[in-house]
Image (cartoon, rainbow, N blue to C red):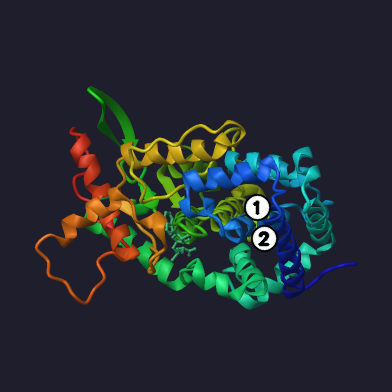
């Protein structure tokens, strides 16, 4: 069997993902869920989505797990060379370059621990399906639909096709909407302009200058050096905004024929300045793969790749974290044994929230009320500042996008509160 069309692959993958989801739901409903599954469920609930622990929410957990598994494997397949035979070991090898968390997740879900799970056969089917996929032809197929110059957004376009085959309603329910590329590039260009024209930073988003910041940790004050232009997308979804930032900066290097300077710049001045937070596993995995693909420049002609492909160094990661952005920044997630990879991720994100002097907050926040995870005392307390002496009747001031604006506002003020010497005092927030 050889699969050459993107639609066909998406349909088949969606069907197998359904089967994995159903097997997990059945395991919970019959009281046969393994320790591995119950462990994952409770750690997801404690760290990210509290309602997942409730009775009746088995399908939501199963869905999150099944989608991450299937889509993670697809994304890894998109990274392997067309001629390579595909296997879970191959997938796991590709992941650590951008993300230690996904690597651990894949080790857990594709290793021997999975052998006793009722859905292990379907996972094998996904691997076989991807092995039979002619990725060259499939990527070509997507290229036709996306239009010149945007072929590198394949992973996201495939995800949309996959989701509409998998469960069209879920897309709406979870607010899985991608920001159109034209809107994203306009916003990113505008921020670049603002940095250059209003902040006097001649290199705009590519700025690599540093400032001294003073961090207050309890009674102690620590002085640190930090890049001046730190960029954060707090609702990063599939990473569209960070992707565009990388794209626009790399194009500048390309125009100046500076391929030789690119790897050192990415390592020293680009990756350390980019941050993203996301609550859901599937878009989070997509964001990592998407930025990984972008930096590996798979969309450029073969001849160019040798010059522009960035090789991640050992232990180097993208600073895109699986976390609840609106969570109290003082909350420390418990280390939960084997599954401590999730709490580690949340705690690293919390350090960014607390200590990094972010200058640019950009992105497209959720416009719905996402559920209980976006209603905690921390963010509701901050929101009270906006409501004070306001008699607003028409606008729902508890809506998620206002919470994210309030959060960004707080985030931007934070460095001014904790640091003194030459710290940024004004910042840009775009949403
Ligand atoms: C409109 S989408 C962003 C789309 C993104 N710009 C893209 O093009 O993929 C909003 C994102 O916010 C995420 N989100 C919602 N509540 C969140 C929270 N409390 N913490 C972190 N992310 C959250 C959703 O999962 C969703 O991916």
**Mark 1, residue position:** 305
For this rendering, which residue is in front, 173 or 274? Answer: 173
Q: Is residue 4 above or below residue 75?
A: below
For this rendering, which residue is in front, 47 or 283? Answer: 47
Residue 17 lies, in percent from the top left, at 71, 62
Q: CA distance from mark 1 to mark 2?
A: 7 Å
Q: Which image quadrant: the N terminus?
A: bottom right
Ligand 1 is found in which quarter of the picture?
bottom left
Q: Is residue 52 above or below residue 397?
A: above
Q: Is residue 71 above or below residue 422?
A: below
Residue 275 lies, in percent from the top left, at 43, 47
> Do labels 1 and 2 touch, CB within 8 Å?
yes
Residue 7 lies, in percent from the top left, at 72, 75
Helix or strand or loop: what does disc 1 sit on? helix
Is 77 positioned to the left or the right of 310 in the image? right
Is residue 102 in view from this perspective? no
Q: Which image quadrant: the C terminus?
A: bottom left
Q: Residue at x 59, y 35 (%)?
A: 313
Is residue 119 in view from this perspective? yes
Residue 167 lies, in percent from the top left, at 63, 72
Is 373 positioned to the left or the right of 166 in the image? left
Q: Residues within 10 Å of mark 1 (few under 14, many from 20)?
A: some
Q: How many tags in the picture? A: 2
Helix or strand or loop: what does disc 2 sit on? loop
Mark 1 sits near ligand 1, with its Cβ under 8 Å away = no
Q: Residue at x 59, y 55 (%)?
A: 61
Mark 2 sits near ligand 1, with its Cβ under 8 Å away = no
Q: Is residue 242 above or below residue 317?
A: below
Q: Which mark is residue 273?
A: none
**Mark 2, residue position:** 301
Q: Residue at x 25, y 25 (%)?
A: 218
Q: Residues within 10 Å of mark 2 (few under 14, many from 20)?
A: few
């Amino acid at each position: 069997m050889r699969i050459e069309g993107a639609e066909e692959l998406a349909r088949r993958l969606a069907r197998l993902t359904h089967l994995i989801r159903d097997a997990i739901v059945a395991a919970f409903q019959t009281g046969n869920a393994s320790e591995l599954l119950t462990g994952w469920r409770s750690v997801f609930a404690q760290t990210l989505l509290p309602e997942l622990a409730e009775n009746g929410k088995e399908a939501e957990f199963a869905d999150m797990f099944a989608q991450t598994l299937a889509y993670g494997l697809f994304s890894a397949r998109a990274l392997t060379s067309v001629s390579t035979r595909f296997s879970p070991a191959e997938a796991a090898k590709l992941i650590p370059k951008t993300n230690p968390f996904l690597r651990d997740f894949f080790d857990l879900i594709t290793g021997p621990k999975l052998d006793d799970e009722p859905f292990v056969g379907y996972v094998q089917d996904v691997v076989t399906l991807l092995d039979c996929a002619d990725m060259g032809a499939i990527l070509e197929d997507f290229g036709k639909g996306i239009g010149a110059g945007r072929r590198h957004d394949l992973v996201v376009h495939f995800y949309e096709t996959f989701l509409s085959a998998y469960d069209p309603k879920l897309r709406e329910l979870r607010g899985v909407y991608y920001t159109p590329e034209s809107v994203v590039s306009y916003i990113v260009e505008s921020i670049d302009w603002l940095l250059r024209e209003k902040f006097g930073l001649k290199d705009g988003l590519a700025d690599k200058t540093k400032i001294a910041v003073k961090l207050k940790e309890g009674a102690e004050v620590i002085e640190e050096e930090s890049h001046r232009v730190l960029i954060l997308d707090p609702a990063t979804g599939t990473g569209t905004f960070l992707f565009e930032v990388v794209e626009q900066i790399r194009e500048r290097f390309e125009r100046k024929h500076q391929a030789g300077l690119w790897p050192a710049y990415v390592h020293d001045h680009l990756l350390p300045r980019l941050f993203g937070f996301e609550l859901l596993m599937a878009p989070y995995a997509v964001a990592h793969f998407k930025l990984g693909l972008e930096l590996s420049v798979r969309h450029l002609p073969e001849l160019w790749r040798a010059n522009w492909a960035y090789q991640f160094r050992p232990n180097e990661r993208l600073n895109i974290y699986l976390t609840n952005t609106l969570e109290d920044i003082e909350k420390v997630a418990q280390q939960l044994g084997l599954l401590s990879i999730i709490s580690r991720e949340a705690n690293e994100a919390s350090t960014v929230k607390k200590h990094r002097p972010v200058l640019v907050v950009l992105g497209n926040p959720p416009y719905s009320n996402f559920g209980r995870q976006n209603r905690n005392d921390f963010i509701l307390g901050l929101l009270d500042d906006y409501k004070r002496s306001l008699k607003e009747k028409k606008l729902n001031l508890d809506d998620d996008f206002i919470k994210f604006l309030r959060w960004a506002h707080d985030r931007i003020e934070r460095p001014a509160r904790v640091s003194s010497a030459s710290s940024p005092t004004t910042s840009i927030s775009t949403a």
